[in-house]
Image: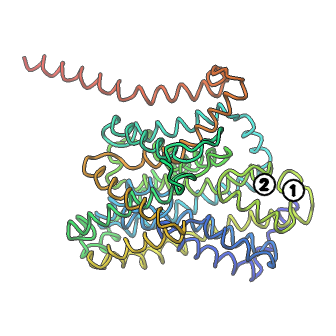
Amino acid sequence: MIENALTSLPLVFEWQILLSMIIGLVAGIMLGAVPGLTAAIGISLLIPLTYGMDPLVALAMIAGIHNGGSYGGAIPAILFNIPGTPGAVATTFDGYPMAKMGLAVPAVKIAALSSAIGGVFSAIVLLLVAPLLATVTLAFGPPELFWVNVLGLTSVAVLLGSDPLKGLISACLGLWVGMIGLDYVSGYARYSFDIIELSDGLSLLVVLVGLYALPAAWQAIEDGQSRQGLDMGRFFKSEKSFRWPWQDLFPCWTRASIVGLVVGLLPGIAGSAGGFLAYNEVRRTNKDPQSFGRGNPLGVAATEASNNADNGASMVPALTLGIPGGGVAALLLGALLIHGMEPGPQLFQDPEDALIVFGYIWAMILTSAGIYFFGGPIASRIFAQVLKVPPHILMPMIVGLTFVGIYTFSSNMFMVYAMFAFGFLGYWMKRFDFPFPPVVIGLVLGDKAEAMLRTSIMLSQGDITILFTRPISMVLVALVGLILAKPLLTGLKRRKLKKQDSAAAD
């Protein structure tokens, strides 16, 4: 395998391959930067066109779109508080506050560099130890995957925001929205109210754009300014005075990349969950956790490093076991089949196929590194100019783009109406300080958790103890319990301090 990996390296430096990587990377960044469009959409449109291409040229372009799309969602998340992709939701927590402080350019650069580091890290792991790491995923059956999803859901609902109860309510709302459509096992429609358009459920993109894009646009128009608290005269001056926290960034990148790697390895879990978990982990271990959500650069770095570390890791089960770790991984398997390659262990045994696969992995490394050069200094200057557009012009354009994006995605006006419904819901949630991320993560992980729960019960023939008796499951249950107990312990501690203060005053 090492010989095949070294032999394939010169192939990716041929001009056709390099050109396809650059085109894919730039296209991916542009796709990710438009709310409603994702790397998966771009790849799905590209795959039919790759039939007549050289396999490595096609796979190199897919690698560029994949990595570029994962990073591109950070740009509107930082500038407008609108995540371009589901994975960029956690980027808004500190990216947008940085933009309001006049630090939009440094925030975009940090996001680009973190994405590059996370992507290179996971692609190198994919190159070196893919078969070995694939065996780790075999230890996670349906019960373990159920608790992984529950852990991600409770982490976001309880640890994010100032009110855990409101976070749990938002998470329950996301779970309910995720239940709309056909039942996973029986095939019966749930909560569709005899509306045909709801039989397939509500798309994550519809909910995401409705909750984030529309309330932000309406609020900006209502306030009469495009960016609250942002001094346009200091926009570029602040970049010069910004000091990069290098000593904190390196451990942050390490933790976040490892979280993204582990999440990406688990089939069916890869996606936005890694960004939330990495954000929570970095905040939990930081000396000043209260600074997160107020413009801490480490929040941006953690989320983006994890998001792109997920990319290469999700390909490990796809390439070695034929089990896609996410939507893009599933599309890659389709591309391999179109070009006559069978995903699985035999993919690395055939010399000709191995050269192409290792060439794809090298393309993942190079396109990850290229994120900083094409998405950092260049993109930050170009997209930052959007901030200078008056709100009465910019915000109607954003609303129009959401309309076009959702209709293009679904070809269904009902989904456009649903988007506006979630826009009104998001507007009132923002007014009453209910957090958005738990809704999104509830929708993302809810159906997966339900699928794993019901699969576990069917495997055990109705014995629910299967969820609590396996070693890995017991560890995950303990972590969930600790997270749920944290608000209670914090409340008891505050009550005790109040009693001590009142006693001292007396």
Tag shown at residue 348: 1
Label 1–label 2 contact, CB within 8 A: yes
| SS of the residue under disc 2 | helix
User: In the image, what residue occupies the spot 40% across and 66% down?
Assistant: 106
Q: Is residue 439 above or below residue 470?
A: below
Q: CA distance from mark 1 to mark 2?
A: 9 Å
Q: Amino acid at mark 2?
A: Leu
Q: Who comes first in sequence, dot 1 or dot 2? A: 2
| SS of the residue under disc 1 | helix
- At which x and y percent is residue 446? 53, 41
User: In the image, what residue occupies the spot 75% across and 53% down?
Assistant: 318
User: In the image, what residue occupies the spot 74% across and 69% down?
Assistant: 59
- Snapshot quadrant of residue 416: bottom left
- At which x and y percent is residue 119? 62, 59
The residue wearing badge 2 is: 319
Mark toward the viewer: 1 or 2 = 2
Outermost residue to the front: 194
Q: Is residue 405 above or below residue 325?
A: below
Q: Amino acid at mark 1?
A: Phe
